[in-house]
Amino acid sequence: MSTWVPPGTDRLLEIGLAEDLATAGDLTTDAVVPAHLTLSGALVARRAGIVAGLAAAIRAWRLVDPLVHVDIVAPDGAQIARGATIAFVEGPARAILTGERLALNLLGHLSGIATATGDLVALVADTGAVVADTRKTTPGLRALEKWAVRLGGGANHRFGLHDAVLIKDNHIAAVGGITEAVAAARAAVGHLVPVEVEVDSLTQLDEALAVGVDAVLLDNLDPPRLAEAVARIDGACIAEASGTITAETIRQVAETGVDVISVGWITHSAPALDVGLDVAP
C-alpha cells in the first residue's frame, strides 16, 4: 500500500495551506466548530477511475494537525468504481474541515490525470505503443502530475529541460537547420545524453535520420504520414508521435507502428475525478 510522495511535496502543501489560511486562519470553521469536536467521514468517488494523490492528501491533513487519522481503502494506483470509498478520515473536526479543500483538490486533480492516462493506455494496449506525458504540467505540480501518469499506466517523458535534449522547431529556426542543431547538441552534452528532434515533415525526418538522432518527435503528422515515417525510420531510432492526440484518434496513431505517443492534455486538461468527503452526522 503506497504512501510515497515526491520530494518537495510538503513544501507545496505548505504553500497551498498558506493560500487558504494566510494570517487569519479558517474564519468559518474556527467560528462555527468547537475546538474539542471530532469528526469522521469517508472519501467517496463520484465516478469510476484510478486513485492518485491520496498520499499527498493525507499529508495535507496531517500538516494541519498530526492527529488526523486516515484508513486507506483504495491506495494510489487502485481502480475504483463509482460510489466506492477511497479512505476513512477521522480526527479533530477543525483540522479535517480546514484541510478538506486542499486534500480534495489534489486527490481529484491527480486522480483525473491517472484516469485519463489509464483510458488511453487501454485503447492502445495491444499495439506496443507507450503513452507518455509532456512538460505541459502545472507549475509546482510536475512531479505529482507525472507520478499520476505512471499510476495510470503511462510513461514519463523528460522531467525538465535538464535531463534530455529535445530540439524543437524554434531551436531549429534559431540556428538554421536540424544538422546544425544536432551537431551543437552532441558537442555540448556528450554521448550519455539522448538527443531527440522534433520534425513536422518527412523531409525534416530524412535530415534528422541522416545526421543521426536517438529519437524523433513526429509532430502533427496524420496517420498515413506517420506510417511512412515509421517505415523510413525502420528501427534506427525511437519514433514518437505527438500533437492533437485524442481518445478518438490514439488507436489509429498507435497502429502506424510508433513507439511512443506523447499527450500534453493528460496533465494540463484532464477532467478531475470528482471525490467528496462525506462526514458522518
Image (cartoon, helix red, strand yellow):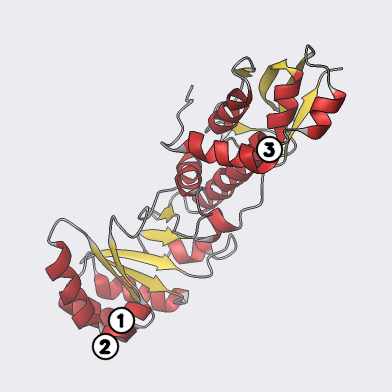
Between the residue at mark 2 and the residue at mark 3, the CA separation in whole angstroms equals 53 Å
Return the residue nearer the eye: 137 or 239: 137
Amino acid type at mark 1: Ile
Q: Mark 2, residues whose alpha carbon is within 10 Å: few (<14), some, or many (≥20)?
A: few
Please, is residue 161 above or below residue 11 in the view?
Answer: below
Please, is residue 119 above or below residue 180 in the view?
Answer: above
Amino acid type at mark 3: Thr
User: In the rendered image, which quarter is residue 194 located in?
Assistant: bottom left
Q: Mark 3, residues whose alpha carbon is within 10 Å: few (<14), some, or many (≥20)?
A: few
Identify the residue position indicated by label 2 in the image: 176
Secondary element at tag 3: loop
Q: Is 99 displayed left or right of 211 in the figure? A: right
Between the residue at mark 1 and the residue at mark 2, the CA separation in whole angstroms equals 6 Å
Q: Residue at 15% of width from left, 67% of height from top?
A: 188
User: In the rendered image, which quarter is residue 169 located in?
Assistant: bottom left
Disc on res. 172: 1
Q: Residue at 83% of width from left, 17% of height from top?
A: 34
